[in-house]
């Protein structure tokens, strides 16, 4: 069913953008507070399965262009504060998605009736993450361990208009789903040249508290345009396996990311 495929696509968009960007910290052992704000964008494709309530399980396999066609508005970014070896890292994502589909079916016989249904779906997703970081290695390769929690919430409104023999009917549904995933991770930063820094990041979480299991890995580089502005880009892979209360989201998201860091 085209409508069901569209709904599955929207769910995949919402959760796939949930991976946090990694903000590069500046300096290691200084005792003054340092801050970095990083607006970022992730061009992710998605592959996996989704299921909600009595709807059948649906497989999703989409390029980023498919997701982009259904995106109304999106904003995402990280903020990191560091003093000495300790730091805090925040991540925030907000997305608005809408999609629609029309389906028609004609019954048998010369005067078979035609049933027409129009479906419209609007969804909002909010994701908030907070973590504490600790620098275990100060040398040329800076290494941080990370522990925190990520909160995800989806709000959806669906309207279906059906027409048969000139008679019309409207069905409206709304709902929301939320959970919290604890996670632990590690970040490594290694200077490649005067302005270039290699960044690696990995985390694992869920542990049955929220998701059964969620993990992600990131490899990228940072380029310092100046002492206060840097560009960040690379590749990220995120996997989420959530299956509770009749809702299944087992999805892998992967693609290039880019962001701009502002240090102060």
Image (cartoon, rainbow, N blue to C red):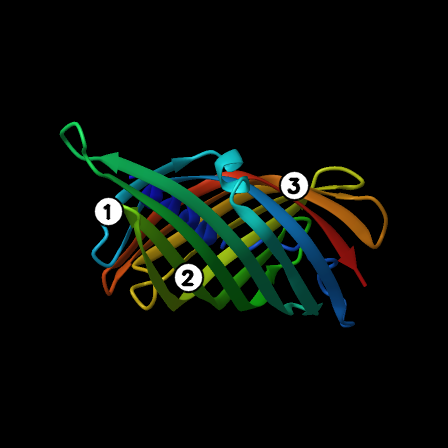
Q: What residue would you read off at disc 2?
A: 157
Residue 151 is tagged as none
Residue 233 is tagged as 3
On the image, the x and y values in percent for residue 9 come to: 40, 44
Q: What residue would you read off at disc 1?
A: 57
Mark before the other along the chain sequence, 3 or 2? 2
Residue drawn where x is 51% and y is 52% of the image: 97
Residue drawn where x is 60% and y is 53% of the image: 73
Mark before the other along the chain sequence, 3 or 1? 1
The residue closer to the viewer here, 126 or 143, is 126
Residue drawn where x is 49% and y is 60% of the image: 125
On the image, the x and y values in percent for residue 205 come to: 39, 60
The residue closer to the viewer here, 260 or 45, is 45
- Relative placement, left or right, of 224 versus 80 is right
Q: Residue furthest right?
A: 226
On the image, the x and y values in percent for residue 15 come to: 44, 53
Residue depth check, mark 1 versus mark 2: number of the one nearer the observer: 2
- Relative placement, left or right, of 194 versus 256 is right
Residue drawn where x is 43% and y is 63% of the image: 154
Q: Residues within 10 Å of mark 2 (few under 14, many from 20)?
A: some
On the image, the x and y values in percent for residue 132 come to: 56, 69
């Amino acid at each position: 069913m085209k409508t069901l495929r569209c709904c599955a696509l929207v769910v995949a968009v919402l959760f796939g953008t949930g991976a946090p960007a990694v903000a590069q910290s500046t300096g290691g052992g200084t005792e003054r507070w340092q801050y970095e704000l990083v607006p970022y964008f992730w061009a992710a494709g998605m592959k996996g399965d989704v299921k909600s309530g009595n709807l059948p399980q649906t497989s999703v396999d989409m390029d980023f262009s498919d997701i982009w066609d259904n995106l109304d508005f999106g904003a995402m970014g990280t903020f990191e504060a560091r003093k000495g070896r300790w730091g805090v890292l925040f991540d925030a994502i907000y997305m608005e998605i809408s999609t629609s589909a029309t389906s028609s079916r004609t019954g048998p016989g010369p005067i078979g009736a035609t049933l027409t249904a129009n479906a419209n779906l609007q969804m909002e997703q909010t994701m908030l993450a907070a973590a504490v970081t600790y620098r275990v290695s100060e040398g040329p390769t800076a290494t941080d361990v990370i522990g925190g929690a990520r909160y995800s919430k989806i709000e959806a409104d669906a309207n279906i208009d059906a027409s048969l023999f000139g008679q019309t009917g409207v069905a409206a549904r709304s709902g929301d789903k939320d959970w919290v995933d604890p996670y632990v991770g590690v970040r490594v930063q290694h200077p490649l040249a005067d302005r270039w820094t290699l960044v690696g990041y990995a985390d694992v979480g869920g542990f049955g508290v929220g998701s059964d299991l969620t993990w992600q890995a990131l490899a990228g580089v940072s380029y310092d345009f100046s002492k206060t502005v840097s560009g960040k880009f690379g590749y990220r892979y995120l996997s989420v396996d959530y299956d509770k209360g009749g809702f299944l989201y087992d999805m892998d998201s992967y693609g290039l990311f880019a962001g701009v860091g502002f240090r102060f």
